[in-house]
Image: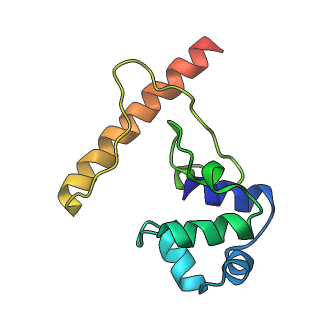
Amino acid sequence: MANVLRLLDEKQLTKQSLAQKAGMSISFLSDLTNGKANPSLKIMAAIASALDTPLPDLLRTANAAPAAAEPPGQYRVVRRLPQGLTQVAAVLTDYQAFHVRQWDAANRKTMGKSEDSSA
């Protein structure tokens, strides 16, 4: 969904307008973009069509920071993670997620320092 959010920002569209164009409710689209629902391929095709974007481009992944972690309009794609870091997706308990968020914040801080020093 990071690509959907990025394209919404680039095309200056609202979730409401995307939902209308894709033929779905705004609440369902919000659930998708907030990670509360998983889209089928048919839904992704409808979103791609509504965004006038090829489906493979919408489905393409990259080692990127989640779009929600950046301020609106400030999407930053990290092409490669530093050695020793791996991006994963998982279903966790609230307790586990709390610890993962702490690790993530520490790693992002480290990554930011390494990007600053290499610039």
Where 112 sits versus 9, above or below?
Answer: above
Closest to the observer: 26 or 106? 26
Give the residue furthest to the right: 12
Which image quadrant: the C terminus?
top right
Where 24 sits versus 56, above or below?
Answer: below
Which residue is at 57% across, 29% downward? Answer: 79
Which image quadrant: the N terminus?
bottom right
The quadrant in which residue 17 appears is: bottom right
> How many numbered tags mark residues here?
0
Where 38 sits versus 4, above or below?
Answer: below
Give x and y (percent) for residue 46: 64, 72
Give x and y (percent) for residue 9: 74, 59
The quadrant in which residue 30 appears is: bottom right
Give x and y (percent) for residue 7: 71, 57
Give the residue furthest to the top: 118
Give x and y (percent) for residue 18: 70, 75
Image coloring type: rainbow
Which residue is at 73% across, 79% downward? Answer: 21
Which residue is at 71% across, 84% downward? Answer: 20
Which residue is at 57% across, 46% downward? Answer: 60
Closest to the observer: 23 or 2? 23
